[in-house]
Every structure is written in C-alpha cells, then in structure tokens.
Amino acid sequence: MISTACGPPRAVGEPPGPPGTVQAVAHDVLPPDPFADDPDDPARAFGDPEDRLDEPISDSERTELLADLSDLAVYQALLEPRGVRGIVVDCGECDEPHYHDWHLLRASLEQLLADGRMRPHEPAYDPNPGDYVSWDYCRGFADGVTANESAY
C-alpha cells in the first residue's frame, strides 16, 4: 500500500524523513560569480545599490504617487473585466514599449512610494500588445464612464 498524504509516495511503514537522495547543502555555499572582476560585467550598469544615496521623495511626488495608485485601482476595476491585462509605457531610455500587468505596476508604484526607487524587474514574456493600453487610454476610458453615468 502507498501513502501519498505528504510528499512523494512512500511504502506504508517506511521511516519518515526527507524523500530522495540529495544531500543537504549549506546556504552560504554559492557558485563563483562568472563575471567576477570582468570589466564588461553587464550588471555594472546597475551599480551597487548600497552606493546610491537616493533622496527621499518629496511631498508633491508622494501625493502624485498616491493619486496614481488610486487611479490605477479604478482603471483596473473598469478594464480588467474587459480583457485588458495592464498598461503599456513607452520607455524613453530604450525606445521600446514596456508592458506592465496590473499587479506589477501597482507593486512598482508602491515600492517607489516606500523606497524612493524601483528595483529592476523582468519584462513581460511575449506580451500580446492588444492586451495592454496606455495610461492616457485608461484616463479617457474612466472619464467616459464617469461622464456617461453622470448624464443619467
């Protein structure tokens, strides 16, 4: 008889314990950095986060971020049920569109609010551009819904 209550199947009566044959490895043992001492290390572009002396965000920037988070909640509530996955932003640095799912954009704005900066994140994998709209589109859509509801 096989027991599958927790973990991979084991024969009934088999002593409990971690299944498999992999030995435990200490957490402080890491492989060497493949770019150690490489002047062309691509991560050098990010700099050392400890070396940055970011100024805290101003009161007006905080107010704007809070307004953006509030607007984002409205836009998501209106557009997500219609199949919109998030917002597309044209990046001025790389001249490429960046696709942000609702939760990723909210997390980025909240991080900016809390830490004064956003950490790099993975871009959306193979996004369908038709699933994303611009911030201006969201604003116009919300304004249209508000105007339509106010008319009655």
Image (cartoon, grey):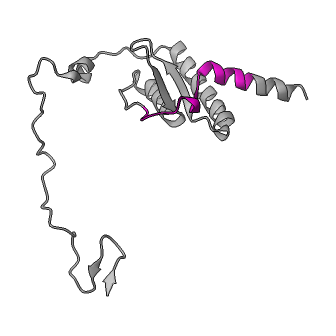
Prevailing SS of the magenta stretch: helix
Residue nearest the observer in this picture, 82 or 147:
82
Question: Can you give x and y, in whole percent of width and height, for residue 124 in the image?
Answer: 43, 33
Q: Is residue 17 left or right of residue 136?
A: left
Question: Can you give x and y, in whole percent of width and height, for residue 66 in the image?
Answer: 57, 24
**35, above or below 20, in the image:** above
Q: Is residue 39 magenta?
A: no
Residue nearest the observer in this picture, 106 or 81:
81
The quarter of the displayed image where residue 131 is located: top right
Q: Is residue 142 magenta?
A: yes
Quadrant housing the N terminus: bottom left
Residue nearest the observer in this picture, 126 or 106:
126
Question: Can you give x and y, in whole percent of width and height, for residue 26 in the image?
Answer: 12, 52
Question: Can you give x and y, in whole percent of width and height, for residue 132 in the image?
Answer: 57, 29
Residue at 34% in and 72% down: 6
Q: Which residues are magenta?
A: 124-143
Residue at 54% in and 21% down: 65
**112, above or below 95, in the image:** below
Residue at 77% in and 28% down: 145
